[in-house]
Amino acid sequence: MAREALTGTALDELRHKLRAGNLADALLQPGPATVLRSGDRKLTRDELRSEAARIAGGLQRLGVKPGDRVAVYAANSLDWVLAYLGVQRAGACAVMMNPDYHSAEAEHILRDSEPVHVVTDAPRADTVRKLGFKILPVEDLPRTDSPPMPDLTPESPAAILYTSGTTGRPKGALLDHGNLLAQARGAMEVWRWTARDRLVHALPLFHLHGLGMGLHGTLLSGGSAVLVPFTPENVVHELTQGGTMLFGVPSMYQRLCEHLEAHPANLSSVRVFVCGSAPLPPALFERCAKLLGQPPVERYGITEGGIVVTNPYEGPRQPGRVGYPFPGVEVKLGEQDEVLLKGGQVFKGYWRNPEATKEAFTPDGFFRTGDVGEIGDDGTLAIRGRIKELIITGGFNVYPREVELVLEAHPAVHEVAVAGVPSEKWGEEVTAFVVPSGTPPLVERELIAFAQERLASYKCPKRVVTLEKLPRNAMGKVQRSLLVK
């Protein structure tokens, strides 16, 4: 892609620089300034460093060794942060768990990762106990004197993050210290992140967007963050009280815009809004530009490599396009226009799944994302859908995102997801699942006619199904498999 000008030795040197170091040592820098706040509770960098070291000592006294897995299964809190950093300080490998998981989902991850302990909170303790794993309460972790920093390299395992499982059972992506450092350092460079910034952090900490960008970026940049449960009121309050950055997903920006239309606020002191984890509709892009004072920086990422492509901080931000590669990342298109990645941010394989690992990489070492892309003349990347979500109707290939972009422009459509429904006549029938806007009324034949004016006939929906809301996972991605059941 056009912006990735470095090649050969220069690119290798950049990747090495981004990856270098021990994650805990890099994150836990001393200092008297407040680094994290949640409600009335605050932690300085010195307090964070000291508490993480004492928790590491407590874990080591329990027998936790470098490389052991320790799961973190709890809601966002400063105690969650301390637990995670204590695990890293002990040299263990943190297994990240969605706190919304129920027993069957939690069981799959715990059986697969086999942690020596599970750090959890009261609402989830019974689930863990019934599965037979050792529990450590997140709000009362054992603490002892600070142990020596373990001897770790950039290749040492740091975290296992499970894929969203939208097309099958979640797989554990094993990320090392170098992967996580490269991801955060890349974000610092492209988004101009400095010690003067305060991030309003309303994302789940277990997810790579909230963890690898939000938490790690804050600690490495020298800046600070405030953890808030997401509501538009919470976010606007913090942004008007000194927040300079916000990371979010499209559904968060949708609600934020709705709030700002009813309760305008001056957000001119906010330096950058970043959006990802799901496609940002062009209409919402324009709405954000008007109500926030600037369009969000849309970016593209994957569990297996963090954020890898972004629109520029300076320069045009284009709706429907996710921009250029992060520093040290190579992007190209393979068969079926699949987006392929290589770089120090990208993981080396799935936990205890060599077959899936082998299938995930090309012979020349590029990771197969499973996403369909298009690279424009200016070198920017656009994501057109998932290969596994490809609809084959009457022998023609249809990518859902192309159809969705057209339907989103209709005033009767609030949200839409397109999927293929089995059909004896067509093989699969292009079907639009629509959340109506309410004004004007949604009329099926009118929406289909709207599509027919703009798309080839085989791409147009044969049927429109109205829903109160689209099924989404924790990061706002539509779960298409649930639409066609």
Image (spheres, helix red, strand yellow):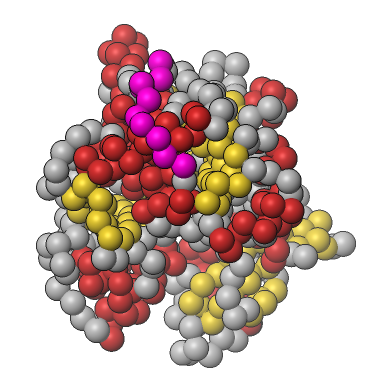
Residue 27 appears in the figure: yes
Which percent across, then down, holds residue 397?
A: 67, 49
**Residue 173 occupies which quadrant of the picture?**
top right
Q: Using the image, determine if residue 137 lies above or below residue 266.
A: above
**Residue 351 occupies which quadrant of the picture?**
top right
Q: Residue at x 31, y 9 (%)?
A: 9
Q: Using the image, determine if residue 213 lies above or below residue 234.
A: above
Q: Is residue 472 left or right of residue 126?
A: left
Q: Nearer the viewer, residue 263 or 226?
A: 226
Q: Nearer the viewer, residue 225 or 125?
A: 125
Q: Main secondary structure of the magenta part?
A: loop
Q: Using the image, determine if residue 193 lies above or below residue 436.
A: above
Q: Residue at x 25, y 51 (%)?
A: 43
Which percent across, then down, holds residue 164?
A: 60, 49
The question of residue 370 being in magenta is answered with no
The question of residue 149 being in magenta is answered with yes
> What is the span of residues highlighted in magenta in the rendered image?
142-151
Which percent across, then down, holds residue 4?
A: 31, 27
Q: Nearer the viewer, residue 151 or 182?
A: 151
Which percent across, then down, holds residue 319?
A: 34, 57
Q: Residue at x 17, y 69 (%)?
A: 240
The image quadrant where one finds the C terminus is bottom right
Q: Is residue 373 left or right of residue 311?
A: right
The image quadrant where one finds the N terminus is top left
Q: Is residue 32 left or right of residue 138?
A: left
